[in-house]
Amino acid sequence: MAKKILTEHINVPGIETFDVYRKQGGYTAVEKAIKTMTPEEVVEEAKKSGVRGRGGAGFPMGMKWGFLAKPEGVPRYLVCNADESEPGTFKDHHLMKSIPHLLIEGMIISSYALGANKSFIYVRGELMYVIRILEKAIEEAKAQGFLGKNILGSGYDLELIVQPGGGAYICGEETALLESLEGKRGNPRNKPPFPAVKGLYQSPTVVNNVESIANMSWIINNGGDAYAAIGIGRSTGTKLISASGHIEKPGVYEIELGVSVEEFLNSDEYCGGIRKGHHLKALVAGGSSVPILPAHLIMKTANGEDRLMSYESLSDGGFATGTMLGSGGFIVFDETACIVRNTWNFSRFYHHESCGQCSPCREGTGWMEKVLHRIEHGHGSMHDVDLLVDISKKIEGNTICPLGDAAAWPVASAIRHFRDEFVWHITNPHEATQPGAVYRGEMELA
Amino acid sequence: MTETPNLVAFTPERLEKVKEIIARYPEGRQKSALLPVLHVAQEQWGWLNSEVMDYVAGILSIQPVEVYEVASFYTMYHLDPVGKHVIEYCRTGPCCLMGGEDVYGHLKQKLGVEAGQTTADGLFTLKEVECLAACGWGPVFQIREQFYMNLTNDKVDQIIEDLSK
């Protein structure tokens, strides 16, 4: 069995309660950090661990902590990003509802490290039942002296607040999240200043993903070096992968970074293979925004090396032949999936979720959806394929936040790898618009 | 249909809850309470009309427009009357791969309404939403806080029948 850092105890009955979590060794990391370590030493362990932002950006968490400004007399904030909304991603949902104390414990350790006395967990509003689970866990931790005033007699105070969102993908972008937390529309801010200098209420703020923070208990108990020894190269530790689509066993799996894509997809420990009687056609490895890959580039890189579940291997070949690990939203498509329809679907998502602040994204996402809609519904023209590529290029890199890129990449990559399928829709509109119709031309399946 | 609120005031229990929410934030930052308080308001009235939003603005000492712009930005807030049960079904890629479009088609047929509409008896409102972070358990819809997962036509029939009783 592969190493488990986050999910080792996730199936223990009653693990959502303080008592059972405590019996499994819970909160020993808080005791160790607060009683025997300085905040700087905790930050040092996070740096040594090499753990990278698990929300999708992959930026080293310890380094992000190191950027936090510390002016005298100004409060500092830690905000946990639990606005999980990237299509294909449901790992934080799973983690928080199953083992809420793992996040609470990580929040206490991380807040102590950053010198924050009031920290927030911003959870997407649709997960109201998870918010109630977290609030109950916070009450339990408080009753046991792990939260509130003078934690474990150390003189350190921490209040933990769970904030519901209102239904907006854009609030997963950290500055949009901060705007939302201030009670405003989720419009991303211009940077600089970065949140580390001016974040929540214009105070220095760190925003980290749920999974990133949840790693902290293990890192404190076992040391940053031990964490860094797991995984491969700069992809240290483990990663939660949300597996969905045409596989035998959809679900959330914790992998050691560096396991091969083939093993993850086909072994019974994880996805259990493509659903019976079907063949692999395409894969979105890291949530809907990362480039889609065709079958022949999934198990092997363009150089013929085994493709691994790591930040580096998945991005091998750049966007020409690679993709990204992203948030670990692993969406599998078999031969029954229509790439044009799926691209239109994703495009509609980004159009719907664009905050409307930057013209290239506000207008461009709408145009892409409209053009894809007409291709999918049998009214496309040959000019439309290049038009889509052109629009995607004009959005990419031209917006305040990465939602523009996230909207552009799925469209550009679908055309890069599945252009024949788009052309088939345009040249065979009658056939392509039959219910369940899928292009079965010169396609390599695995 | 939910009744249009005419006497706009939180119930005493909800008012306590709202005060507790406002107290979470630093002094002068009570606007941070806006999203959670709007959820409480929607729990009480089912949807948010301008009287309710003005009332919330008064409680938080902010301008009504600051409430309107937020309530209209976030998709969870209903700005029109809704039925007793709001069924919010996920229309995004992974749920569709798992047969979502067929299941939702069946749901619409069963209720005789399209997305955005309410059944004549006022029991159900259908609402199309984007990804609910439950892709491995799709197709999915949500009614209030409850998730209904791995939906099939049969399951949909059962859920609708149970809620119609």
Image (spheres, coloured by chain):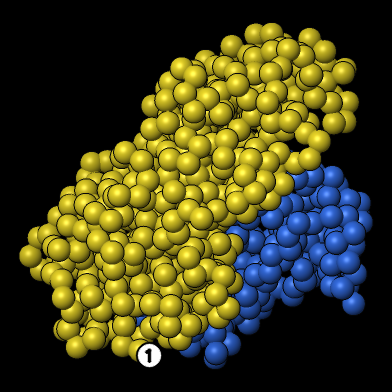
Point 75% across, 24% down: residue: A376
Point 60% across, 21% down: residue: A296
Point 68% across, 69% down: residue: B146
Q: Which chain is yellow?
A: A
Question: Can you see residue A95?
Answer: yes
In the image, A127 versus A108, the foreground residue is A108
Point 42% across, 70% down: residue: A102
Q: Give the side of residue B60 with respect to residue A379, left or right.
A: left
Of helix, strand and loop, which one carries label 1? helix
Pinpoint the chain carrying mark 1. A
- Residue behind mark 1: A143
> Is A27 above or below relative to B38?
below
Q: Give the side of residue B74 with respect to residue A195, left or right.
A: right
Q: Give the side of residue A446 with respect to residue A358, left or right.
A: right
- The 10 Å Cα crowd at callout 1, few under 14, some 14 to 19, many 20 or more, is few
**Chain B in the picture: what colour?**
blue
Q: Give the side of residue A211 with respect to residue A10, left or right.
A: left
Please, which residue is most extreme toward the left here? A72
Q: Position of residue B18 (x, y in %)?
A: 47, 81
The C terminus of chain A sits in image quarter: top right
Question: Can you see residue A138?
Answer: no
In the image, A92 versus B11, the foreground residue is A92
Please, which residue is most extreme toward the front here? A1
Count the numbered circles shown.
1
Q: Position of residue A226 (x, y in %)?
A: 28, 56
Q: Position of residue B16 (x, y in %)?
A: 48, 88
Name the amino acid type tagged 1: Ala
Quarter of the image for residue A368 reads top right
Q: Position of residue A273 (x, y in %)?
A: 68, 41
